[in-house]
Structure formats: C-alpha cells, structure tokens
Image (spheres, rainbow, N blue to C red):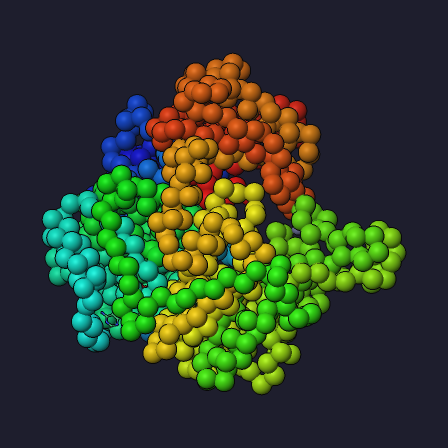
Amino acid sequence: MSAVEVAVALPVTGTFSYRVPDRLTGQIDIGSQVVVPFGRRRVAGLVMALGASEGASPRPTGRARVEAEIAEVAQAPSVPPSLLALARFVADYYGAPIGEVVRTLLPPGTRPAARRRVVATKLGRKALVAAGAALRRADLDVGGADQERLLARIVAAAGGLAPRSLAADRATLERLVARGFVEARDRLARAARPEAAPRVDVATRAPPTLTADQSAALTEISAAIDARAFRPFLLHGVTGSGKTEVYMQAAARTLAAGRTALVLVPEIALTPQLSSRFRARFGGGVAVLHSDLPPGERTREWHRLRRGEARVALGARSAVFAPLVDLGLVVVDEEHDGSYKQQEGVRYHARDLALVRARDARATCLLGSATPSLESFEAARRGRYRLLAMPSRATPHPLPEIEIVDLRLHRPAPGTFLSGRLTAAVRATLAAGRQAILFLNRRGFATLVLCRDCGVAARCRDCSVALVWHRAMRRLVCHWCGLAERPPETCPACGGARVEPLGVGTERVEAALAETFPGARIGRIDRDAAAARRGTTEATLAAAARGEIDLIVGTQMIAKGHDLPGVTLVGVVLADVGMCLPDFRAGERTFQLVTQVAGRAGRGDEPGRVIVQTFQPDHPSLVAAARHDYAAFFAAEAAERAKLGNPPFGFLALVRFEGADAAAVERCARELAASLRTGCGTPTLRGPPSVVVQNGGAVRVLGPGPAPIARVRGMHRWQLALKATERKTLRPAVAAIIALGSAAGRSGGAHGARVRVVLDVDPVSLL
Ligand code: ADP
Ligand code: ZN
C-alpha cells in the first residue's frame, strides 16, 4: 500500500502522510482533492506529492507522519501541480501554515471540513424503482414498507442526508446499508456540477490602430511571449495611454501561441468596464473571477479554466491562484495598488506571486501602472525588469493641467469646502454640460464630534481612535471595528451641550455640493454607499457613463481605472488626508492617488482640468504629481527610502502582538525582541542561531513599541519590525519568529494570558 503527502485545509503547519487504501489505488494523483481523517474530524485536503513516507523530502514547515488512510477522493478535477508549488512557496515565504494556503487553491465553494452524508447507491435507486413497479427480484428486494419509505427519502434528498437526521431510523438504515442500497460518504460541499460553457465568440470588437508607444511596447512583449521564457516588464504608461489595449493584444498573442493568460486587477467590482472590454474581445474565452459572484458561478468559472475552456482569467488578488495550465502571460494592472496585499490570514502579495508564477511557468510578466511602486521601478532601473514607457495619452487630449490651491490663503466659504477657484470651475463645468469628480479620501460626514466646551472628542471604547460621524445613519462609527452608536446629547466628559461635528468626509461634501449647486445631479461612491445597497457602485458608475450624473463625490474607489469621457474637471477637496500617517509609504500613496484621480479628467473629446486643494502646497509628492513628474517623485522618495533602508532598499517583516491583557502583550513583545537580539539566547528560540544581530548586523530588530493604533476591538497591540538589507537574510529571522511566535501562542505567553503573534512579511501598511 502506498502513501501520499497531503496538505489538509486547516490552519496547521506542515503536511501529513496518508496511506492509500487498495480501493482507491489508481484514483489518486498529485493535486487530487481528498477527504482525510484528521484527529476526530474529516477534512478536505490536497495531495501534494505521491509516495511520501516518514523521512520523505523534508519540507521547510513540514512534519510527515503516517496519520491514517485517505477516506475519499473527490470527483473533481485536480489542482494543477504548478499551483501546489506556488502554495509551498507562499507557506515558506510568508510563514503561513500550508493548510491555510491550500484553502485558497481549492475550487470556491469547497468547505474545509467534509460533511458526512448518507446517500443512495446505484443499486438502491434501482431497488426503489423496482419496489415502485412491484417488480420481484431477490437482489432488489427492499424488504418492507419502512425500508422503502426511508430509501425514498434518501433518494429524494439531493446530496444525501446527514446521519444525525436519520438517528430515529437507525435500525432501518442499517438494514439498507447491509443490503448495499445506501452508504455513508464524506462530501466536500460543492455547488452543482459545472454547466456547459457559454459560446465563445472571439474578437467581437475590432482592436483600434495602435499608437506608436503601444506598438513599440507590444513588439517587445510579443517577442517575449514567443520566446516562452520568463521575461518581466514594467509598463509605465500615463493614465489614458491605452495600457488595457496592450494587455488585451498581449493576451490574444498568448492564446495564439497556444498558452493561457492571467490578468489581475486591483478590485474587480470597481472596474466593471475592464471586464466588459475583455468580454467584448474574448467572449466566453475569458473567465471573470469575481468575489461577488454567487458561489455556483464562481465554481463554474474555476472549472472552465481548469478544463481549458476559458483560457484567459481576469480577477482580483486571489485570482493569482486561478487554475490555468500552460500559463504564458501574467498581467498585473495598477501594480502599485495596495489591495494586492492580503491583510489577514495568509498575507501574500498577489503582484509578487504573479512574478513567481510567471517565473515558474516561463511566462511573460507584465506589470502596468501610471504610478509604479518604488519596488517595481527600482527593479526596472536595475535592469531586472524591462521598462516600457508610454508617456502620452492614446486619446486626443494630453494629460490635464493640475493646479494647486493653497487652503491657507484661499479659505473656502463656510460650509462649502470648496475654494473660490474650485467652486467657479465646478460651476463652469455644469454650465458646459460636463461632469466633475470631487475626490476626498475619507468617508462619513465629519471626522470627529467634539465638545466645544472641553475639547473632548467621542472615541471608540474598543479602539484607540476617534469615532466618525455618519449623518445619514445618525451614528458615530468606528472605522476600525465597525462599532456604530448614537451620538451623545451632552458631552460625557463635561456635560456641555455643544457637542458638534468637526472636519469633513465624502458625505458632508455631498451635502455641501447639493446646497451650493442646487439642481446638479450628485452621486457618491464610497464604501458606505456600496454597503447600503449591493451594486450601488456599479450603478452609479454606469449612470455617470450615461451622463445622468453631473457631480461624482468619492473616495479612492473613484481613483481607479474608470474611463468616463464626460469628466472634464477633477477636484481634490483635501489632499492632506493620509499624507501624514505614520507610515513610510504615506508620501507614495498621496502621489499615486492624486495622479490616478487626476487621470480621470479629460479622457474624452474635451481637455481636462484638475484642482488640488491642500494645506501643504509644497509637499514634494503633491508638487511632483502636479507636474506629472514621476521621475522627480521617484528620485526624492528613493533618496529618503535609501537613507532609512526602507523598501526597495531593504526588506521588512512586521511582527504584531495582540491580546486583551496589555501587560502580557508588552511582555511578550519585549521577550521576543530580546530573544531575537540575542540570537539563541533563550530556550524557546529554535530558529537558526545568531542570524539576528543587533545594530549593523544582517537583520536589525526595530522596536518593540505600541502599534500606531494601539488598541483595536479591545485588543492591545504592540509591534516590532525586522529590517534586512537582503531578502535572503530576512528568511532565517522569519523562521525564528515563526518558532518563537508559535511557542508563545501555545504556552499562552510565558505569563498565562493569551497573546496572538501575527507575522507580516513585506507589509504594505505599518498601521
Ligand atoms: P489606461 O489603462 O492606460 O489608463 P485605457 O486603456 O483605459 O488607458 O485607454 C484610455 C482610452 O483610450 C480608452 O477609451 C481606450 O479605448 C482608448 N484607446 C486605447 N488605445 C487606443 C488607440 N490605439 N487608439 C484610440 N483610442 C485608444
Ligand atoms: Zn472601534
């Protein structure tokens, strides 16, 4: 009897060896989805390797032991082996349990824990038919009304019945089992079998004549696709330069070469236009992996890709695990976008994994952006990626002029939030029958509610942040934990009656616009509007595209790749939001957001205009954005990063400690930091000794200290950071953290109170 190596879909470290029973011989292959016993449970798992046994190739996080037998093989297509390799990489690099990674590989709708179901066998179905037809045959004799009734019930229940629900009929059930009419099986809950694929009609819309920049870029990309070797590109194309057209033609070329293409976008719900452009070009050949799709549909798209019926996959972050085989092209649109980084569970970065997947598949990798991340641009500068530049727009009008309005000098009229210049520009836009976008990266009505007598602001009781006033909901909301409470009538601190909102969010801008411009049709796009009703974002964008909305107010949700030709004016209400966050990427985000949102203006027949309001008109990120000067932004930002050894000139891992007991959290953080600093100084440290040294060594330990948001959901938070000059020196330190962290977690900390240790390799947010 042979054995296989299985990763179970539970957050456990390491893979396990299971025996293959004789009855399943020949049915199990690498990538097979199986059900295995695990402790007292039965869980879903993936076969990672064949012939595994004790002492089989040691895995970085693995511990092989013969657990038991495989219980069941799912009647479902296997997961491609290339994805299993990717899963191992993710587990290793991000220090995540392989089981948790494996969950992301299983077709959507698969449950980690199998459900035991009583189902009818083929023979049982026949027997039921025979009983109904009063057919007498010894092997089909159900033997009695009770049995027949129960058998009918089991046959009628599609998907079988839970054994518990049949407890009352135990004896009858046993008789049916003994006759071979029914059996208990472990099923991985899964939506119905995939349906027939939609008709594939390719090239329903003819591609435009390429601009010179586009065709130069495509020439190089095509050569790479034909070479069938790993070739990474950074496509630095200004907003409106026609990057999407390049992606689509590269994908078409890849299909023509007989290979498949993966296209990642930051948030698919925010870019309905992109998917419709791909659908128009590739018809049923594109599978859109959209987390808002009903599970059945998502499963169907997974199966279409796995069977090669759809050969282009389009989706957000998790689509990096799409089951494509013979991958020839990976595109990452808006590669700088922070939403590619998963912020909980397995903290992978989809852009970085896209590169890994492309490398392993010998595929072309195309990272596209108008505002490349420092990481990608530096890699291009060093020649690791080939830089393709598209510095002008594909449409008739050049990039819009960006004016900066100094709010210190040009105060908006009370309650309007718009300076005289921006107000006049909006009025002119409305008069011309055009549209304007008013951007403010803060949702809600007011930033705070504050007692005007004692100055105390309403704060969340579970998080160390102020509550945001949402007027439409009439609630004070915590943007960290979601707490929503009624506003106090009087100040809880001094009893004063003057508790009033202060500051501005999108909801308040919307209200102010309605007063300033009566008659204008206003739409708002932010997470609150989206949460109020499903599909609101798409509906508002579609209405804007039809010209049924004049003014669009929104957060960063409107900064992403929308193509609204009627928009001629973009106003940034307050560029300072987020500019001073305690995060070294704050300046980069400001540059990206202002550039991206400015890029929404003037994409149609009319030129665009952009007005940026700020209290810091000299901020280097704003000045560079206003001049459309990526090079200047990069030079200044890179110098700053290099000085501090921040990415891309160093590598970071963040370790966060969370727990209800503040003292325990602090102690745990301090102890772990001390252990890291002394290398092998404590008995709990099981990582490689002495790789972590203080000051000037290969890896520096920064902190620990309280996290910038020191309490969330009642949990106290501390953190420390590891900073390394090279990626490979960070790895052993990360391994040490995992050992220490899990030791701390297991023992509940040295002092009894539970402290959660969360590791984030290559963090994108330090909050
Ligand atoms: P980006 O993604 O670079 O911001 P898009 O791909 O959205 O730009 O293209 C911007 C606009 O230019 C779109 O309306 C697109 O249809 C149009 N466009 C792209 N390429 C061409 C071309 N070669 N000729 C004419 N219009 C083009
Ligand atoms: Zn809170």
Does 760 appear above or below 459? above
Residue 716 seen by the camera: yes
Does 60 appear above or below 534? above
Q: Is residue 401 left or right of residue 201?
A: right
Q: Residue furthest right?
A: 495
Q: Is residue 576 left or right of residue 129?
A: right
Residue occupying image coordinates x 42% and y 53% = 624
Q: Is residue 271 left or right of residue 702?
A: left
Residue 314 point in image, percent of width and height = 31, 61
Residue 185 seen by the camera: no
Quadrant location of the C terminus in the rendered image: top right
Tell which of 36 and 190 is nearer to you.
190
> Number of marks in the image?
0
Residue 250 point in image, percent of width and height = 20, 59
Residue occupying image coordinates x 29% and y 66% = 393
Residue occupying image coordinates x 54% and y 58% = 575
Report which quarter residue 61 is drawn in.
top left
Tell which of 205 and 697 is nearer to you.
697
Tell which of 577 and 254 is nearer to you.
577
Residue occupying image coordinates x 20% and y 50% = 364
Report which quarter residue 703 is drawn in.
top right
Q: Residue furthest front?
A: 409
Residue 37 point in image, percent of width and height = 41, 39
Tell which of 616 and 661 is nearer to you.
616
Q: Quadrant of ligand 1?
A: bottom left
Quadrant location of the N terminus in the rendered image: top left
Q: Is residue 462 left or right of residue 385?
A: right
Residue 610 point in image, percent of width and height = 46, 67
Report which quarter residue 507 is drawn in.
bottom right
